Amino acid sequence: MTLGFSTNLSQSNRALSVYKLFSDKWRYYIDNFRIFESIKTITMGQALSIDSSLSYRLIDDKDVFMLISTVREGIKYTLFQSIADKIPFSVSEWSNFLHLSERTFQRYKKEKRTFDPLHSEKILEITLMYNKGSEVFGDKANFNAWLEAKNVALGGLKPKELLDSTFGIGLLRDELTRIEHGVLA
């Protein structure tokens, strides 16, 4: 009789521990969902900073999902303007990078529009690449000079000329990684 009671008790304990395990996992998922939802409610200006906080080195899975969400929602012109003010590219250059006319930029500014996902993604890629370059070169002035100089490793092109395509941005990111590790072409 005692054996039956202890067996039932151990089965109860196992059932209770399995229940606790699943409830803990659900609580974890619910808490993470709440955190994700609260992150989404942060204004994109706070979530995206042009300073060293938006860097390839600092991005983890949570940040990637925030970037994906930002891209899908689109970047508002006001946030783009704050990014553009800190990166020394002219409106004409941004226009070329994003394949938009300068007139379209003027309309976006006037109407306070949001960039579509393709343009938003390119803006973020350029921002990440610029921050990485500033980090690798130690300051913005040195990196800006590198962007303007013809580069043998890039087929004699100025690095800035490659910012109009994701392949070019990837090539620059790879080149910056080589420079960072002392592997010069």
Image (tube, helix red, strand yellow):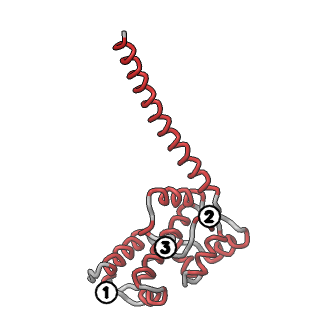
The mark that comes first in sequence, 2 or 3, is: 2
Q: Residue 166: image x %, image y %?
A: 43, 68
Q: Quadrant of the N terminus?
A: top left
Instruction: Please state which amino acid type lies under the numbered disc 1.
Output: Val
Q: Secondary structure at mark 1?
A: helix
**Which residue occupies 43% across, 80% down?**
135
Nearer to me, 85 or 49: 49
**Which residue occupies 41% across, 20% down?**
9
Identify the image quadrant of residue 134.
bottom left
The mark that comes first in sequence, 1 or 3, is: 3
Q: Residue 147: image x %, image y %?
A: 44, 85
Reply above or below: 118 against 1: below
**Which residue occupies 53% across, 72% down?**
99
Q: Secondary structure at mark 2?
A: helix
- Judging by the rendered image, the residue that carries numbered circle 1 is 152
Instruction: Please state which amino acid type lies under the numbered disc 3.
Output: Ile
The nearer-to-camera label among 1 and 3 is 3
Nearer to me, 79 or 10: 10
Left or right: 83 with respect to 175?
Answer: right
> Circle 2: is it few (<14), some (14-19), or many (20+) Cα within 10 Å?
some
- Judging by the rendered image, the residue that carries numbered circle 2 is 44
